[in-house]
Amino acid sequence: MIQSILTLGLASGALLMGSAPAQGVAEAGEKPSYSFREAPLNSMGIKSLSELRGRPVLVEFWGTQ
Amino acid sequence: MPSAIKTAGEYGDDLVVLFVEVQGATPEKAEKFAWDRKWMGTSAMWTTERPFNTGSKGIPNYALISASGELLMKGNPMSDHSKIMKAIDEEIGKAKKGPDDAPKSLKSAYKAFAKGDFAKAIAEAQKVADSGDEDAAAGADLVKTFQKDLEAKFKRVDWMLENAYLLEAEEQFEALEKGVKGLADFDERVAKLTETFGADDMKDQLKAAKSYAKIEATLAEDGLDEKALKKLEKFLEKNADAKIVARGQKLLKLGGK
């Protein structure tokens, strides 16, 4: 029973969030770092978060489903 | 989502807006989804790679990162809207003035760099570096940082040229050329790009890029509309030799053509 609830919970979490995160949870005050495998669309070739420094960055996580 | 699109349009280059699709869509599916909802047409960036996890269980969720790369706040973008806007305004102001902990003697160098007067910025920082006083080491570090940032800006122009973002490359180069005037270290770079933009076929390439930009703007406004896609198809046939064709073909494919 507990196993089923856990499985269901994990499955619904996956539905909400989709792909696995790149790293652990980033908290306020931390400096997240990440190198993109593919440059984001419209980024003009930017391949890492650190290259965005110099301007504030608003990251919005969204879904297509 | 529409609110963040609006924010991206309002703040332009002062703010980076990065949209991250986190439900496992392919880059093509995510891009088509955004075109169909008329979300394209701003400078916002799009990716399907999650660069970090906010720990939130729902979507949309957001994170605001400072100009120095520090995560400032995160949460639900709808309920935090006014908090986010206030923080963005503050961060843009700070980014233009330089970091809070920067020595007072280097503030004018930061301001000059933010305004695009790169030669003045480096000269100001160099002056502090040469002063021999307590801020000298910070001044020397800042000169190196500015030079590295400028290198990255020139590399970005190269990337834009290679990937058919010609109008953007021209605009960025004009700003760089003006800003580095007097900096001998960048003479060679400027000369090479001047030659590229002065080449015989560049005028035609830029003309094609301008026409393409108009079609792309219509598609951003109307979604991947059949009429505009047909116009794009005709444009691509007529401008088969233009560098911009690769971008147009990708868009046409997204539109199902």
Image (tube, grey):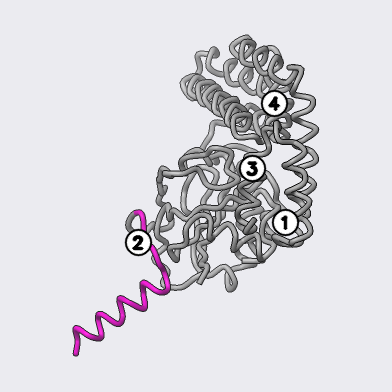
Q: Quadrant for the N terminus of chain B, please.
A: bottom right
| Helix, strand or loop under label 3 | helix
Whole-percent x, y for residue B235 in the image: 77, 43
Chain identity of mark 3: B
Position of residue B226 relative to residue B162, above or below, is: below
Residue A14 inside the magenta-drawn segment: yes
Position of residue A64 relative to residue B136, above or below, is: below
- Circle 4 residue: B173
Disc 3 marks a residue whose amino acid type is Arg
| Helix, strand or loop under label 2 | loop
Residue B220's tag is 1
Answer whether labels 4 and 3 touch (C-beta < 8 Å): no
Position of residue B116 relative to residue A61, above or below, is: above
**Residue found at the very far front of the displayed protein:** B237
Q: Which residue does the image show at 63% across and 20% down from the upper left?
A: B124
Residue A8 inside the magenta-drawn segment: yes
Disc 1 marks a residue whose amino acid type is Ala
- Circle 2 residue: A20
Q: Which residue does the image show at 56% across and 26% down from the upper left?
A: B155
Structural distance between the alpha carbons of marks 3 and 1? 14 Å
Is residue B159 at all visible to an observer of this figure? yes
- Circle 3 residue: B247
Disc 2 marks a residue whose amino acid type is Ala
Q: B103 or B42: nearer the eye?
A: B42
Answer whether labels 2 and 1 touch (C-beta < 8 Å): no
Looking at the image, is mark 4 or mark 3 earlier in the sequence?
4
Q: Quadrant of residue B173?
A: top right
Structural distance between the alpha carbons of marks 2 and 1? 30 Å
